[in-house]
Amino acid sequence: MTTDELVRLLGSGEMQERGKALIWAHQNGIDGARGLVAAMRDPRANVTAQAWAMIGLEMLRPLPTDVTHDVLVEKLSDPSPTTRCHAIRTLEKFDDVTALAAIARLVNDHTVDGSAWGEEDCSTVAGTAAAAVNALTASAEKSGRLTVHVFISTGRFQSFDEMRAYVDKTYTEDGEGVPSPFMREVELHGYEPMRIEAIESESRQPVSVAELVAKSSWADRWLPALDGARTADAAICVFSPNLVVYPERCALAHLGCVHFRVNKDEP
């Protein structure tokens, strides 16, 4: 079936026509999934076509993440709140924890999804996003799927205390939390201080990142995926469930983000 045909059938006002597209996708497995992805990316695909293509992808679960992830994350920026909500829910159903930061960018999007029904707090994009973030975060922690963001700098901090002041939340006399500069810069969600490691060079001189963070938690699992030859005199390693939404906004250099697995019984 061609992309033109899929777009027409998926966007039809007739249930029977949309059903033809889903039957074809089901019969063709991974190729059917790729056909649905192509239809979603077609500029002629209306909101109905987008929604039914995502329903079709859900019916084909499990699917490789490399087939579904990119197009669903793209749809998080769609002009239609209905499409954005469908994309959020589909990523949640695929248990795609690598999409957490992209979904978290929508927790302040209070646009109403006109097609929504049921729970009131999920009738907005923000409500749908918040629910998905909570569900995916719990799933990731339970299954030992972790994420680390590594930030580095040279000459920025004059002491370890200064670095911690940049990272750590403070509290007023009334116990109200005050986000740190780092937290505000990256719009940190799910603050868990025990999972943020601030590291300074023992010599106070720049060294390779590989040497600097060698003793960080689970370094053997994620360090090989980063450029360990870069040099710095300070590093901040932010592990999930801390959720870094905008790493590019940090005043420090963002070395990278790595998704990795650990045994869920490991400390």
Image: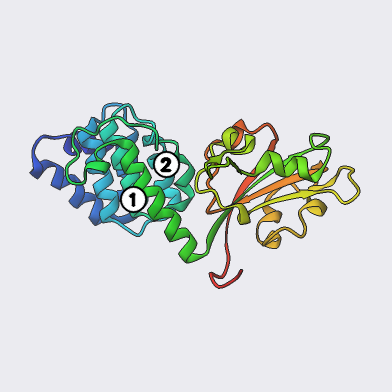
Location of residue 156 (image quadrant): top right
- On screen, residue 151 versus residue 136, left or right, reads right
Residue tagged 2: 103
**Residue at x 26%, y 42% (from the top left corner):** 121
Instruction: Identify the secondary structure beneath mark 2.
Output: helix
Location of residue 12 (image quadrant): top left
User: Which amino acid, by three-letter code, is at mark 1?
Assistant: Asp
**Residue at x 90%, y 43% (from the top left corner):** 205
- On screen, residue 203 versus residue 224, left or right, reads right
Mark 1 vs 2, N-terminal side: 1
Say whether marks 1 and 2 touch (CB < 8 Å).
no
Q: Is residue 92 visible?
A: yes
In which quadrant of the rendered image does the C terminus lie? bottom right
In which quadrant of the rendered image does the N terminus lie? top left
Residue tagged 1: 31
Distance between mark 1 and mark 2 Cα atoms? 27 Å
Percent coordinates x, y for residue 241 in the rendering: 52, 54
- On screen, residue 25 versus residue 177, left or right, reads left
Q: Please rate how many residues cluster around mark 1, counting C-alpha atoms within 10 Å: few if below 14, some from 14 to 19, many from 20.
A: some
**Residue at x 66%, y 61% (from the top left corner):** 221
Q: Residue furthest front?
A: 173
Q: Closer to the camera: disc 1 or disc 2?
A: 2
Percent coordinates x, y for residue 157 in the rendering: 80, 37
Percent coordinates x, y for residue 117 in the rendering: 17, 42
Location of residue 186 (image quadrant): top right
User: Which amino acid, by three-letter code, is at mark 2?
Assistant: Ile
Percent coordinates x, y for residue 56 in the rendering: 25, 49
